[in-house]
Structures are given as C-alpha cells and as structure tokens.
C-alpha cells in the first residue's frame, strides 16, 4: 500500500499523520503532535528539525507528502466569468486573475473551484500563492526526505472530511469551524465546496462559546452574497469527548440551529498505537485526515497549488511520424529505386505543407476565439456600475450633517444588471426625508422610500428613514437590444466581506 505523510502546522505545533492508502481504505499508522518552541516563529528551519526525526522514527522516508496551507498564506478572489468551454476555463481564469489580484506574478500557480453557473455566466473561486512560499514547503519536505505530492488549501482539506462522513446528515449549506494554533477558520460549504473562508482569532476563557457564536453569525452575514439567497443550515465542529459535546450543545442553544460534532478519526482504520488512545485535541487533525481520504477521490473539490488546473497539452505525434518515415526510407533504400524515392520525397513534402497549412488555420481560429473573449471581458468591465462614483454623487445631494446622518449603505448588482443601493439613516424632521427623495430623483435615480419612522431615540435626529435607490446599468437605455455575450467582472464586496477576506 502506498505510504503517505499528511502534514499541517501552525505557530504552535506540527500535526503529522502517517498512513497507508489503498483505494477507499485508509490505515492510519500513527498521528502525532510535534510541539514547536512556542515563540510563534514557525520558520522552515524549525519545522525541518522537528519533522525529520519523526519521519525517521516511523520509517516513512521517501513517502508521499500531502500538506495543508493556511488561508492567510494565499490570496482568494471570487471571479464572475462568461460561460466558456471547460478546456478553455484555466486560461480565462489566469487572464482575469492576473488583472484582479493585488499581488501576483506570472510564475505564481493559480488554481480555482467552479462555484456556480447561471445563463451566460459562471462564478469561480480563484486562489494563488507566491512561489517563494511554495519553495519553503519544498525545502521542509526535502529535508525530511519526503516526496511532494500536493499542497492544498486547509479549509478545502477539512471540508473533504465532512463530505466523506457518510453517516452525517448533510444539508446543502454548512458552516465549518476548524481550530488551529491561535486561530479559527470559518468556512461556508455549499454542495461540499468552500465558497467563503474567514479566519479569526481563537476565543478563550469563560466566554469562549459566546465569542464563537458571534463570529459565526458575522460569517453567515458576510457570506450571503455568495450563497445566492440560500442560508446556512448546519454548523460543523471537529472534536471528540465530553467537553466537545458540551460545546456543541451550548453553541446550539446560542445559535438556535443545528450544530453537529464530527470525530475526525471516525470510520478510519487505526494502527496499534492509536487504538490505545487518540492524540489530545483530536479535532485539529480534521485537515490532515481530510487530505488522506481525498486520495481515493480524483474528483475532489480542492485548491492544490502543486497541481493547479490547466489546459492539457496534446500528445505529440512526432515519435510516430519519425518511426513511419524511417520504415519507408528503409524499404525504398532496399529497393534501390532512387528515382521513386525522389518522387516519394516530393509527395511527402506536399503532405507536410498541407498539414502545416491546416494547423496554422486552426491556430488562427483559436487565436480569434481568445481575442473575442478578451473583448468581451473589456465590454463587461466598461458596463459595470462605478460604486465609488455613485456614493460620491449621492453624498453631494444629501442635506448637511446637522440635518442628516447616514447609518448604513449597501450596494449590489441585481440579476437585470442594474445597481441597487440601500440607504438607511436618521434626520431632524420628516421634511428632510422628502427633500432627500426629491433631490435623488432630480439626479436621475429611481427611488423607493418607506416613509419615515419617528423613533425619538435621538433628540437631534428623531426620524429614521430607508431608501432603495436603483441605478440603471450604464448604456442600458441606448443598448437595450445589445445581444453581446456577457463578459468578465469581479464580484463587488460589502464592507463585511472586504473585512472578512
């Protein structure tokens, strides 16, 4: 059975799982926690020294290494793309990522997950990591004499464990809570795919559950745009033992929703040492064990930076062509027909030129298709709503600060392509509300108000109001019959989402 070492480390410890994998069978020989010095400096040198001895003790030298990488080490971005064939999608994703990612170089690997599709449009979660960070991982594995097999985003690995818990009643949308070191990764899973990932500081002390419940609520609010109207129906906690069960119960009472606990080692074959007792805080092994169960699932939804998705290169026909020509040449030489050989050579040159001409024609057609995609992307970007400009224009129309105070501003793009803004605030009297609506309408906006509510909570601003403002998609009135295909754009994020990611 092939040997694997699954690794996951943070600023406090290295978690290593030594296992044999054959098909759907995962035999876990041992799972160990290798503490670091506690200084928070988890440098490659320190991890190498900690890991090398453990690999030698378990006799796992030259085994395949599968490693997790934390959310904080990668850049993630949701991309909205025009609907394209699957074999062209890697190039389209890379093209858009090189434009939209804040820090990226041409040699950085880019992987992605197809999140959802709608008529003429698809959404992918794209991710990249610097080559210098990947080289640090390779250096650690080389020092322990392990073969790099894959480097997977940690929340995706833990999500795979949830998918493979066949006895778990799974809802379509789940929120996974995975602790590591001094932090927690909160991941929203939709159809077992990581669609939204948020990292927060791990709460401690007597109010730990209250703080955790608050972070979960904030994550669900921030992920609403990515869920397309769906709601989180289930919260997943990793761990085992009585303390874990109590935590699940308390969290259920505070959230008033289903909270399910998962023992990461459940359903796996355990070696002799593990049968005597599991390592402490077993819930932190969810990511490493998720990596192992994925080895039997080639269709797993992972972000793997050693094996990113890319266009498959066609197999070369050159060896076959060379062998054919050599055989023909030998027959002609043996026959001694120099003249016939000359005629044959001319025929071969004609065929080769015809084939080259045909290949060039295909290349031209492929290039034209790429050019059309590029132009479509530019058209999409030109028609996108400029939120900053809209905020500036609305601010200039509002009454002065001594009459109006804005409490909340939200903006999103509707399915029709129009921009919609929600404006909530308080004013000094009801006539100011009418003035706001009138000035916005004079600026060309479609405004739908809900009147005013006299709350009397603030003496200076006793009236509360809410306005729904519609901004028609640029060029819509002049191009209502425009049937161009949709182009690429980047999903706009609310303040909550921007802070989360």
Image: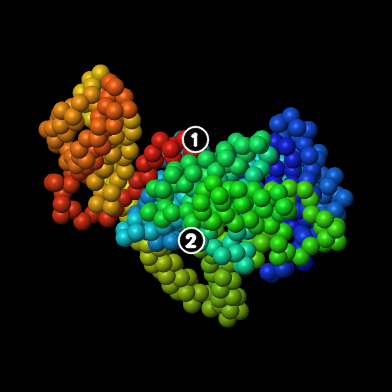
Foreground residue among 159 and 455 = 455
According to the picture, the residue beneath numbered tag 2 turns out to be: 172
Foreground residue among 66 and 173 = 173
Q: Where is residue 369, by image quadrant?
A: bottom left
Q: Where is residue 323, by image quadrant?
A: bottom right
Name the secondary structure under disc 1.
loop
Q: Residue at x 23, y 24 (%)?
A: 428
Q: Is residue 36 above or below residue 68?
A: above
Can you name the residue that lies furthest to the front here? 456
The answer to whether residue 493 shows anywhere in this view is yes
According to the picture, the residue beneath numbered tag 1 turns out to be: 103
**Badge nearest the viewer, 2 or 1:** 2
Name the secondary structure under disc 2.
loop
Q: Where is residue 18, by image quadrant?
A: bottom right
Q: Quadrant of the N terminus?
A: bottom right
Foreground residue among 182 and 405 = 405
Q: Is residue 167 above or below residue 81?
A: below
Q: Residue at x 40, y 35 (%)?
A: 495
Where is residue 94 shown, x and y percent of the image?
A: 45, 48
């Amino acid at each position: 059975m092939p040997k694997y070492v699954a690794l996951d480390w943070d600023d406090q410890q290295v978690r290593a799982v030594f296992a044999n994998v054959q098909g759907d069978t995962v035999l876990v020989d041992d799972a160990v926690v290798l503490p670091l010095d506690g200084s928070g400096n988890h440098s490659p040198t320190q991890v190498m020294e900690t890991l090398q001895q453990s690999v030698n003790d378990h006799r796992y030298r030259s085994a395949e290494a599968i490693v997790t990488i934390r959310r904080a080490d990668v850049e993630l971005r949701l991309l909205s793309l025009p609907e394209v064939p699957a074999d062209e999608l890697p190039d389209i994703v890379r093209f858009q990522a090189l434009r939209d990612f804040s820090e990226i170089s041409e040699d950085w690997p880019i992987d992605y997950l197809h999140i959802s599709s709608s008529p003429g449009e698809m959404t992918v979660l794209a991710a990249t990591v610097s080559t210098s960070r990947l080289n640090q991982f390779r250096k650690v594995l080389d020092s322990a004499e392990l073969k790099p097999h894959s480097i997977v985003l940690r929340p995706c690995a833990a999500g795979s464990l949830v998918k493979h818990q066949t006895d778990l009643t799974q809802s379509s949308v789940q929120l996974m809570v995975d602790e590591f070191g001094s932090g927690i990764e909160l991941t929203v899973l939709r159809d077992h795919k990581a669609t939204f990932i948020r990292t927060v500081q791990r709460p401690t002390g007597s109010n730990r559950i209250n703080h955790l419940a608050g972070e979960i609520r904030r994550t669900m609010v921030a992920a609403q745009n990515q869920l397309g109207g769906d709601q989180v129906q289930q919260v997943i906690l990793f761990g085992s033992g009585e303390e874990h069960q109590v935590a699940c119960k308390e969290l259920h009472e505070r959230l008033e929703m289903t909270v399910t606990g998962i023992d990461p080692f459940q359903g796996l074959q355990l070696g002799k040492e593990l049968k005597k007792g599991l390592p402490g805080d077993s819930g932190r092994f969810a990511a490493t064990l998720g990596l192992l169960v994925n080895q039997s699932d080639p269709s797993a939804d992972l972000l793997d930076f050693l094996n990113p998705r890319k266009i498959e290169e066609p197999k070369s026909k050159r060896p076959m062509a060379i062998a054919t020509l050599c055989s023909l040449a030998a027959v002609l030489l043996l026959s001694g027909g120099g003249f016939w050989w000359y005629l044959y050579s001319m025929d071969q040159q004609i065929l080769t030129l015809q084939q080259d001409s045909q290949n060039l024609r295909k290349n031209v057609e492929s290039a034209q298709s790429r050019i059309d995609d590029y132009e479509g992307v530019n058209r999409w970007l030109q028609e996108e709503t400029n939120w900053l400009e809209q905020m500036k224009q609305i601010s200039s129309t509002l009454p002065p600060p001594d009459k109006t105070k804005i409490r909340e501003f939200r903006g999103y793009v509707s399915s029709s392509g129009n921009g919609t803004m929600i404006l909530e605030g308080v004013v000094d009297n009801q006539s100011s509300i009418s003035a706001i609506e009138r000035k916005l309408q004079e600026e060309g906006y479609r405004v739908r108000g809900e009147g005013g509510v006299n709350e009397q909570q603030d003496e200076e601003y006793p009236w509360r109001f809410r306005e729904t403002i519609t901004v028609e998609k640029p060029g819509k009135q002049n191009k209502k019959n425009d049937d161009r295909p949709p182009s690429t754009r980047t999903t706009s994020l609310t303040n909550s989402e921007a802070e989360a990611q």
